[in-house]
Image (spheres, rainbow, N blue to C red):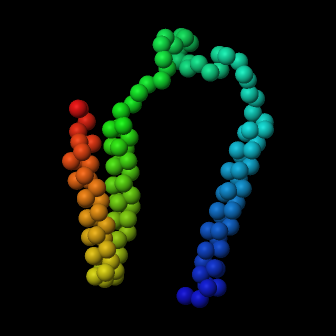
Amino acid sequence: MPFQALLDSYLAVFIAAIIGFFLVATALIAARVLAPFSKEAGKSISYECGMLPIGSTRASIPIRYYLFAILFLIFDVEAVFLFPWAISFGHAGKAAFWEMVLFIGILGGGLGYAWKKGVLQWNK
């Protein structure tokens, strides 16, 4: 594929990325400049149902929940790669098959490691 054809096919993506970056940057700058900020002491406390908090408002969440969420994301991304591969399986050839077997093997190894470490046991 010549460079000009590649440039033409990605020109719209590049323009959309620039416009998106400009819009997000403009929104962040406008929010920082135009939003009212108050240094009042009541702004820094947690608010729920109008009652003042008793004790610490910070809660300690076990790391196991975060690891479980990361595992979910990993296998969700695997599904995103697996569906288009399965649709084009007939046209992809042997190399694509073995690459997907390697990909699934690496993710299976990660799942086995997480299982061995006890990440998947919810009650511990």
Q: Residue at x 78, y 36 (%)?
A: 34
x, y percent for residue 68: 33, 43
Quarter of the image that includes the N terminus = bottom right
Q: Residue at x 75, y 33 (%)?
A: 35
Frontmost residue, 2 versus 120: 120
x, y percent for residue 75: 33, 55
Q: Residue at x 71, y 50 (%)?
A: 25
Q: Would residue 10 be found to the left or right of residue 88 on screen?
A: right
Q: Is residue 8 above or below residue 38?
A: below
- Disc count in the image? 0
Frontmost residue, 78 versus 114: 114
Residue 87 visible to an observer of this rendering: no
Locate residue 29: give its quadrant: top right
Quarter of the image that includes the C terminus = top left
Residue 115 visible to an observer of this rendering: yes
* Residue at the extreme bottom of the image, as rendered: 2
x, y percent for residue 123: 23, 32
x, y percent for residue 4: 64, 85
Q: Would residue 108 be found to the left or right of residue 20 on screen?
A: left
Q: Would residue 87 be found to the left or right of residue 39 on screen?
A: left
Locate residue 83: give its quadrant: bottom left
Q: Residue at x 26, y 70 (%)?
A: 101
Q: Is residue 19 above or below residue 30?
A: below
